[in-house]
Image (spheres, coloured by chain):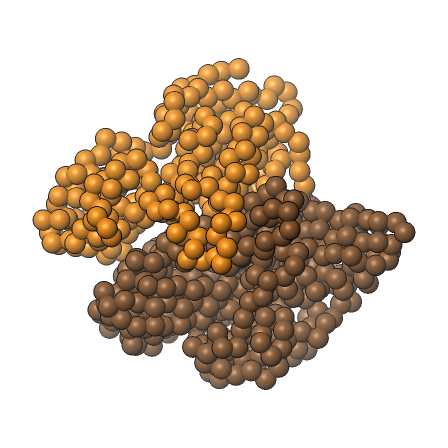
């Protein structure tokens, strides 16, 4: 029986360093491993004894791609711990900032990281040679997303303006207004994006996933909602740890998140879409239908279409918020340090991001826990790989390898984030088995 | 071949910049490496958006896994290195990167000072590990997070958490044109004055490291009603003792002062020494 091995090291067009290994004996899969080698950074440890006010700035540094998500989840948790409420105006500005992050992160993934797979190109630069107008459009949309984060947050990577209680400084209408015209363009460009990605070739691939996302009745979820699933879960964020747990897996250094009742699950754009289609805007719904999507979509390769639909929605939302903007009465609700425990969960571009903090009476962090989206998707990614390889095992190794990479990139995995949750899997014969590379640890 | 003297990265010996200019048609090869970090600084390259296509025209992007599957073998004309050294693997790997790079430019607070993960340097990493892991004795991580210049000679450093896109594009442009990149070595206060901000030290504003921090952010935090927290690390010839004295006299508790210096560039020498001199014993 002929043995074959797929090895991709490092995985390209993902954030952070990971390796894929698939071992096959003839037509049977022996092993699928998505290894993550990001070095440990110990965030939960050094967050201890830091002030509650520092958590948004510190946790942002877990990930340069989605710092807004870390700031929003940590702020929400701290405000819960300190029984703080904020005005609707502040909530709108937070949503605007999140729209900016969704737009830049989704445009990055759609155009620079994911699309090249569908057209058999190594990267977007190669794509830019063939279709410069397409890549320019993607870069321009991305830039507008970054501009929103910069105006509301101070800078696009590791913004500095969001704080527990609100913002350090409110943007003026004068600062936000120039975004209107740009967002009108970005909205139309997102419709174009949806038309374009709908023409890409999609492998026929579906699994019966359990999708998990936030949900609230009034709007497509970003900062607010209960945690719901397609398996019937409907819980408050504070109940997260009663329903989700992590388990060690034999082959991996990683700790994989599972739902206690339903096993592996799926977070991110596809999950949000399947659980919240009804709260999308009419334009986004129409664009999705025109792209051939129903109200549900179970093909992760089509996540590029769903991401584009979300990008369109985020442009519309950002425009709506800016058009209705009147600076709130005050930039923040004043806050005093106190003892307490709080949880926060928001929709990072890649899916739900959970934070929990316990504060001592001086407002210093006594204990912290963070579960990023890629941690939650990892088990599902590996199961996708098994099914994908099974379906395509007759293909030449080069083609099969690329298909596997694409199956991973469906999830827009953020390995820098994921590292954070990873824990040691001790193997026989040494701390990390025979692997010379360092394991990934928080 | 030309030689240009560069300004010296902190903690390393004086280095000499040698750009081997491509004679004829070969475009310089650019590689982008990632060690312990958040990805934000290399994202800055992709965030260059339209300049990105210009950069891609000026160089061959030879190794940049975040952006491309394609890989071109070294040696590389310019290597940008993001992240700090925190594992035995990376401590070895950086020598490989150095050997295959004509110019090595470390980018960001992690690569130039050790980053936020260098907070472990003030503790016993085993204690950190115990907080998070069931079997900390098996961890294969170094006790300290260190900048690239602690391990290999570095040709140029771009500071910041994250780096400034403008500085990145300017530095790449300079290097590609065989010029020495120039970044400001004065303090955040200068940028603050230029912006016309009201000084927080004088008006009882929030704790601020502006007087001792290198410019580069455009005095971002003071422009948003908050104090500087030192993303670009200590500037040249700092008087941290005087600034600390000022804050302590303004009734800042010592533990808060220590935390102020222990942010994203906590182990840059001037900040490390200052925070250690105020550390409350048995804390």
| Residue at the far left in the pictured view | B249
Q: Is residue A7 visible?
A: yes
Could you say which is closer to the camera, residue A218 or residue B101? B101
Query: Residue A330 occupies which quadrant of the picture?
Result: bottom left
- Taking B67 as reference, is A249 above or below it? below
Task: Please provide percent x and percent y for residue A360.
Answer: 27, 67
Q: Could you tell me which residue is drawn at 23 percent across and 51 percent down? A: B282
Query: Which chain corresponds to the colour orange?
Result: B
Query: Residue B75 occupies which quadrant of the picture?
Result: top right
Q: Could you tell me which residue is drawn at 32 percent across and 48 percent down? A: B263
Could you say which is closer to the camera, residue A108 or residue B127? B127
Query: Residue B149 occupies which quadrant of the picture?
Result: top left
Give the side of residue A212 with respect to residue B121, left or right. right
| Residue at the far right in the pictured view | A1
Q: Colour of chain A?
A: brown
- Taking A329 as reference, is B153 above or below it? above
Q: Is residue A285 visible?
A: no
Could you say which is closer to the camera, residue B143 or residue B83? B143
């Amino acid at each position: 029986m002929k043995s074959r091995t797929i090895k991709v090291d490092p995985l390209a067009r993902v954030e952070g360093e990971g390796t894929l290994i698939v071992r096959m004996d003839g037509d049977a899969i022996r092993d699928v491993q998505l290894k993550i080698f990001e070095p440990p950074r110990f965030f939960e440890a050094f967050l201890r004894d830091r002030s509650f006010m520092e958590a948004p700035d510190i946790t942002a540094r877990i990930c340069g791609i989605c710092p807004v998500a870390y700031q929003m989840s940590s702020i929400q948790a701290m405000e819960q711990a300190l029984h703080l409420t904020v005005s609707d105006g502040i909530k709108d500005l937070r949503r605007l900032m999140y729209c900016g992050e969704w737009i830049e992160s989704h445009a990055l993934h759609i155009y620079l990281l994911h699309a090249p797979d569908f057209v058999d190109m190594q990267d977007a630069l190669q794509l830019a040679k063939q279709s410069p107008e397409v890549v320019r459009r993607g870069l321009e949309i991305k830039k507008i997303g970054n501009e929103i984060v910069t105006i509301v947050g101070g800078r696009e990577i590791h913004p500095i303006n969001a704080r527990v209680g609100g913002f350090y400084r409110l943007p003026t209408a004068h600062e936000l207004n120039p975004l209107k015209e740009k967002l009108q363009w970005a909205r139309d460009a997102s419709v174009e994006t949806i038309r374009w990605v709908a023409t890409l070739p999609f492998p026929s691939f579906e699994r019966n996933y359990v999708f998990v996302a936030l949900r609230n009745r009034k709007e497509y979820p970003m900062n607010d909602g209960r945690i719901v699933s397609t398996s019937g879960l409907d819980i408050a964020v504070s109940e997260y740890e009663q329903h989700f747990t992590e388990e060690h897996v034999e082959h991996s250094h990683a700790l994989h998140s599972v739902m206690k009742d339903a096993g592996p699950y799926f977070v991110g754009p596809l999950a949000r879409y399947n659980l919240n289609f009804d709260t999308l805007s009419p334009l986004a719904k129409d664009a999705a239908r025109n792209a051939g999507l129903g109200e549900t979509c179970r093909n992760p390769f089509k996540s590029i279409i769903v991401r584009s639909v979300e990008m369109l929605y985020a442009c519309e939302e950002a425009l709506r918020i800016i058009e209705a903007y009147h600076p709130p009465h005050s930039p923040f609700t004043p806050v005093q340090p106190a003892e307490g425990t709080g949880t926060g969960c928001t929709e990072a571009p890649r899916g739900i991001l959970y934070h929990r903090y316990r504060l001592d009476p001086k407002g210093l962090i006594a204990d912290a826990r963070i579960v990023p989206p890629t941690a939650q998707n990892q088990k599902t990614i590996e199961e996708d790989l098994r099914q994908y390889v099974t379906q395509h095992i007759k293909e030449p190794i080069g083609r099969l390898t690329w298909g596997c990479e694409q199956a991973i990139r469906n999830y827009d995995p953020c390995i820098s984030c994921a590292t954070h949750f990873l824990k040691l899997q001790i193997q026989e014969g040494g701390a990390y088995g025979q692997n010379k590379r360092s394991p990934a640890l928080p | 071949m030309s030689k240009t003297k560069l300004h010296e990265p902190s903690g390393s010996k004086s280095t000499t910049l040698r750009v081997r200019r491509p004679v004829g048609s070969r475009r310089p090869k650019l590689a982008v490496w990632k060690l312990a970090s958040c990805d934000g600084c290399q994202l800055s390259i992709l965030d260059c958006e339209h300049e990105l296509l210009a950069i891609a025209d000026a160089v061959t992007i030879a190794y940049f896994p975040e952006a491309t599957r394609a890989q071109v073998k070294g040696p590389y004309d310019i290597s940008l290195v993001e992240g700090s050294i925190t594992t035995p693997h990376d401590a070895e790997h950086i020598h490989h990167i150095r050997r295959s790079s004509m110019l090595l430019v470390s980018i960001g607070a992690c690569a130039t000072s050790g980053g936020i993960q260098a907070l472990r340097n003030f503790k016993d990493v085993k204690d950190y590990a115990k907080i998070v892991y069931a079997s900390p004795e098996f961890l294969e991580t170094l006790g300290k997070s260190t900048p690239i210049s602690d391990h290999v000679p570095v040709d140029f450093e771009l500071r910041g958490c994250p780096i400034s896109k403008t500085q990145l594009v300017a530095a790449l442009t300079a290097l590609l044109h065989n010029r020495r990149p120039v970044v400001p070595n004065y303090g955040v206060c200068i940028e603050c004055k230029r912006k016309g901000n009201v000084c927080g030290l004088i008006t009882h504003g929030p704790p601020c490291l502006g007087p001792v921090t290198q410019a580069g952010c455009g005095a971002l935090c003071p422009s948003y009603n908050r104090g500087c927290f030192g993303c670009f690390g200590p500037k040249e010839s700092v008087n941290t003792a005087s600034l600390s004295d000022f804050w302590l006299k303004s009734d800042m508790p010592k533990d808060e002062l220590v935390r102020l210096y222990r942010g994203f560039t906590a182990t840059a020498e001037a900040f490390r020494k200052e925070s250690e001199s105020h550390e409350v014993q048995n804390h």
